[in-house]
Image (cartoon, rainbow, N blue to C red):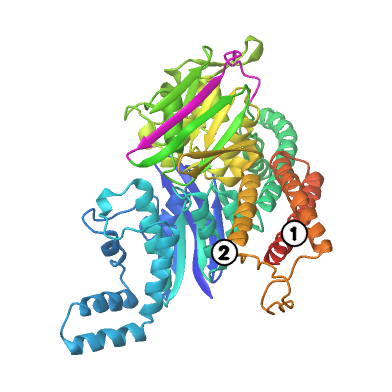
């Protein structure tokens, strides 16, 4: 069943063309991810599909039986409503039946009560109520009487997400679900639940996300918006990267050919008299088309990583017995850690566990209850927080960066200009001279990030840097950080980003406990899952029956689990040894794929990745089976 048909769609803002003459179709069951740098028109395209924006030209045909539902970055709500009341503002027959039923509980009108119960059965509202409670619980929304106006930004987003997922359950009509960065403000457990929910649900979905693991798990189609065009890719994120590389290689070959022809044609054009024959006029038209191709700039700026950073001394940063509480809530308890030169540490844990508090204490932005902090004399912090960028409304991007310095220092006394540095972070010349107030939300995040790096710190502290960043910017940032010679602390829920950058985890596990784990984020999650499974198994295991002398042996009940054989025990040990090694191999291959440009090598790496992923999946299934014994 066709949901949406779009033909020759064009949209501009002033002189900036976002996309031009793009066409596409959305069919029932499609799960589509849109990939593009911020400012390319992703959010605008979604708003056009919703009917909230008008295109300059082209047609949008949405099947009359389709309901289009949007989960947006900007959420509108009445601050006086409770969470429960906000959830009940959904406009659907099952929700209305639920509202009538709750009213009937306070009524003595038996006809009204009977009618309300009948409506609950007709519209299957009992199932909807259970679904709503389950969704709210998974998103850690427990106090339904709390006012919307008292919630944090992250809590508001989770409530809005719960409402949207409930809405897709409530409607029996066909629904196209559009989601713009749904994983922002969700902790890892919530992201994994949402990932599982969307991948299994029989829905039609258009998704914008920077989370590459999430994208791969949920979507099978990728739309790439670039240079005003829309490109289509079937398969994984790795497949998209491979296709993009092939397209760019082909384009570069076409440009090289056009350049050679352009030089010859230019020489001919200069020799021609003013009067043109029909034949020479045709050749002249061809010349201008060739010139257009020859002057196409497909060069991708690559970051010069041999920058000049302020020297790190012997003493970096040492924390000794740091404790911090808010009322009865204990966040840090006698935490000690000594940071090393060049160390890349990831901090993980549930929302509200104290991760941002630790970052603030390290920088002296928040007082500690007890303990000592010793910071090296040469340390220069660069802090990327979630508070956003402060700027003057009419200030231009280039002027904002030049306030720090006209140039950025590289090794051997060389420098690059502020404009060149901006281009490295995907700000073209036109955007550089635009007011900051005209940038999209994602572009402002990118500028904020660049502003921190341009100050040339030697100790970076990043608090959720990937929120609202596009995938091209994330790739630039990751390459920068992989070669960064200073020390680095990252708080992030982006599993792919953490796996690629950090090799050491500090995990907030509750009640002030911080676990020091050597390895990347996925390795920590796997180790924690195994420990939780073993602990659960130990708790559920019955107490052994003491042997009583001179009493005949009691036959074990048939339902009692058998003991693991020697062969199975060895198999389990082998799996637990090899799984982390396979995870490391997979992470290494994914890292190589992101940086590889040779087509044959990409194909080989993709095949290796598929083989390793399949083996890992089989190991995980077998590990779970053995754990049950």
Name the image quarter holding residue 15.
top left
Q: Along the line of sight, which residue is nearer the eye, 471 or 198? A: 198
Circle 2 residues within 10 Å: few <14, some 14–19, many ≥20: some
> Which of the pair 541/580 is nearer the observer?
541
Q: Is residue 220 visible?
A: no
Does 381 sit left or right of 305 as displayed?
left
Which of the marked residues, 2 or 1, is nearer the chain's N terminus?
2
Q: Which mark is residue 572?
A: none
Mark closer to the observer (2, 1): 1
Residue 300: percent from the left, percent from the top?
64, 34
Label 1: element kind: helix
**For the magenta stretch, what is the residue range?**
304-327
Q: Does residue 365 sit above or below 75 in this rendering? A: above
Please tell me whether residue 9 belongs to the stretch shown in magenta. Answer: no
Is residue 541 something one can see in this rendering?
Answer: yes
Q: Quadrant of residue 86?
A: bottom left
Residue at numbered disc 1:
619
Could you say whether the residue bearing mark 2 is in a helix, strand or loop? Answer: helix
Q: Nearer the viewer, residue 591 or 493?
A: 493
Residue at image location 38% in from the left, 36% down from the top: 325
Q: Quadrant of residue 293?
A: top right
The residue tagged 2 is 199
Whether residue 311 is in magenta: the answer is: yes
Q: Is residue 107 above or below residue 280?
A: below
């Amino acid at each position: 069943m066709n949901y949406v048909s779009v033909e020759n769609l064009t949209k501009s803002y002033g002189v900036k063309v976002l996309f031009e003459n793009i066409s596409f179709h959305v069919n029932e069951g499609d799960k589509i991810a849109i990939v593009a740098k911020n400012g390319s028109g992703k959010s605008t395209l979604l708003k056009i599909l919703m009917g909230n924006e008008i295109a300059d030209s082209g047609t949008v045909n949405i099947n009359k039986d389709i309901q289009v539902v949007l989960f947006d970055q900007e959420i509108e709500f009445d601050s006086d409503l409770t969470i429960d009341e906000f959830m009940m503002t959904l406009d659907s027959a099952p929700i209305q039946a639920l509202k009538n039923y709750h009213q009937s509980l306070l009524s003595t009108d038996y006809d009204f009560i009977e009618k309300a119960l009948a409506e609950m059965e007709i519209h299957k509202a009992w199932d909807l109520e259970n679904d709503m409670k389950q969704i709210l619980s998974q998103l850690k929304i427990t106090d339904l009487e709390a006012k919307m106006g008292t919630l944090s930004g992250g809590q508001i987003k989770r409530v809005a997400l719960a409402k949207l997922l409930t809405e897709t359950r409530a409607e029996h009509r066909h629904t196209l679900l559009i989601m713009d960065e749904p994983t922002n403000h969700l902790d890892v457990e919530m992201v994994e639940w949402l990932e599982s929910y969307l991948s299994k649900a029989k829905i039609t979905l258009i998704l914008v996300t920077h989370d590459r693991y999430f994208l791969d798990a949920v979507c099978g189609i990728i739309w790439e918006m670039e240079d005003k065009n829309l490109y289509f890719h079937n398969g994984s994120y790795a497949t998209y990267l491979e296709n993009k590389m092939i397209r760019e290689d082909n384009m570069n070959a076409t440009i090289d050919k056009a350049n050679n022809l352009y030089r010859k044609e230019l020489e001919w054009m200069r020799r021609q008299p003013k009067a043109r024959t029909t034949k020479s006029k045709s050749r002249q038209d061809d010349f201008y088309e060739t010139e257009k191709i020859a002057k196409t700039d497909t060069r991708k700026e690559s970051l010069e990583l041999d920058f000049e950073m302020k020297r790190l001394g012997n003493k970096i940063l040492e924390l000794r017995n740091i404790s911090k509480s808010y009322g009865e809530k204990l966040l840090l308890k006698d935490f000690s850690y000594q940071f090393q030169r060049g160390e890349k540490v990831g901090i993980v844990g549930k929302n509200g566990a104290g991760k941002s508090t630790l970052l603030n204490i390290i920088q002296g932005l928040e007082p500690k209850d007890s303990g000592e902090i010793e910071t090296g004399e040469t340390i220069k912090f660069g802090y990327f927080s979630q508070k956003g960028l402060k700027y003057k409304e009419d200030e231009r991007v280039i002027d904002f960066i030049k306030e720090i310095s006209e140039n950025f220092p590289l090794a051997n006394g060389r420098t690059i200009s502020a404009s060149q540095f901006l281009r490295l972070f995907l700000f073209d010349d036109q955007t550089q001279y635009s007011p900051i107030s005209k940038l999209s939300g994602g572009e402002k995040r990118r500028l904020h990030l660049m502003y921190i790096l341009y100050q040339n710190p030697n100790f970076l502290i990043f608090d959720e840097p990937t929120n609202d960043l596009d995938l091209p910017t994330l790739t630039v940032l990751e390459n920068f950080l992989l070669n960064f010679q200073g020390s680095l602390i990252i708080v992030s829920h982006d599993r792919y980003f953490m796996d690629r950058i950090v090799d050491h985890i500090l995990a907030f596990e509750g009640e002030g406990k911080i676990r020091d784990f050597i390895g990347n984020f996925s390795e920590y999650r796997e180790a924690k899952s195994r420990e939780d499974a073993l602990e659960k198994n130990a708790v559920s295991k019955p107490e052994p029956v003491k042997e009583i002398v001179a009493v005949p042996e009691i036959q074990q009940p048939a339902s009692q689990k058998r003991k693991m054989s020697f062969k199975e025990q060895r198999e389990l040990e082998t799996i637990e040894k090899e799984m982390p090694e396979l995870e490391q191999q997979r992470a290494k291959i994914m890292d190589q794929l992101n940086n590889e440009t040779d087509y044959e090598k990409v194909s080989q790496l993709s095949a290796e990745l598929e083989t390793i992923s399949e083996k890992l999946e089989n190991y995980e299934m077998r590990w779970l089976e053995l754990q049950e014994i």
